[in-house]
Amino acid sequence: MECRNCGKPLEDGLRVCPYCGTVAEELREMTGDSAWEGIPRTPGSRNLTMKEFFNHQVMRKHRDYLWIAAIGAYFAALSSLFVNTFAVFDLAGIISALIVLGLALGMHLGKSRVCAVLLAVLVLPGGGGALRLGLAGVCVIGVIQTFEMKAAWNSYQQRGDYPGLW
């Protein structure tokens, strides 16, 4: 199925085009109008779900930066897990790597500000090295992006708009 407004392909089950925000009219016609009550058609409406909002094209920059932060954290956690499991067998190191991995998953998949901040707090106090410094930078990017995404969501919820969303 394609969006009538922008012509891009829509996944099955999407109520709103993630690229332009247009209600999927073909779905409206197939299911009847009552199933689509309250779905946004104009600026100022606040009926997107959080998932739909975060998947919207205008949030792409934030998602991309968050993905970069998550890849950095995944790499650090998995390499630490590998070294601590097979090279030195340090149980505390294994647990630490699993905690970092869990926080990275929470930051990336859950868009969790708490996970992003905890990840940064765990990484920043550590000792030197370019890799550690790079990971700290990546964690800061994750913190910034999760806070910006939440601020955009709050703005959308309160005022029904987000610059560039419509």
Image (spheres, rainbow, N blue to C red):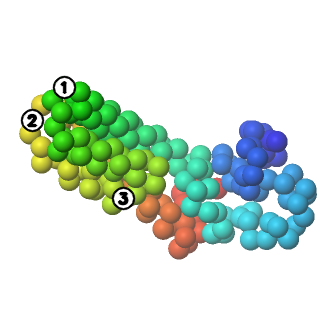
Identify the residue position indicated by label 2 in the image. 128
The reply to whether callout 1 and callout 3 are in contact (CB within 8 Å) is no
Q: Any mark on residue 87, and which?
A: 1
Q: Residue at x 47, y 49 (%)?
A: 109
Q: Quadrant of residue 134?
A: top left
Q: Residue at x 46, y 54 (%)?
A: 110
Q: Residue at x 55, y 53 (%)?
A: 54
View extreme (left): residue: 127
Q: Is residue 138 above or below residue 15?
A: above
Q: Any mark on residue 70, and which?
A: none
Rounded to the nearest angstrom, the CA distance separating label 2 from label 3 is 25 Å
Pointer 1: residues within 10 angstroms few (<14), some, or many (20+)? few
Whichever of callouts 1 and 3 sits on the residue coming sooner in the sequence is 1
Q: Look at the numbered disc 3 and give the secondary structure of its residue.
A: helix
Looking at numbered disc 1 in the image, what kind of residue is underneath it? Answer: Ala
Rounded to the nearest angstrom, the CA distance separating label 1 from label 2 is 21 Å
Looking at numbered disc 2 in the image, what kind of residue is underneath it? Answer: Gly
Q: Look at the numbered disc 1 and give the secondary structure of its residue.
A: helix
Whichever of callouts 1 and 2 sits on the residue coming sooner in the sequence is 1
Left or right of residue 27: residue 101: left
Q: How many marks?
A: 3
Whichever of callouts 2 and 3 sits on the residue coming sooner in the sequence is 3
Rounded to the nearest angstrom, the CA distance separating label 1 from label 3 is 33 Å
Pointer 2: residues within 10 angstroms few (<14), some, or many (20+)? few
Q: Any mark on residue 113, and which?
A: 3
Camera-nearest residue between 31 and 41: 31
Pointer 3: residues within 10 angstroms few (<14), some, or many (20+)? many
View extreme (top): residue: 87
Q: Quadrant of residue 94?
A: top left
Looking at numbered disc 3 in the image, what kind of residue is underneath it? Answer: Arg
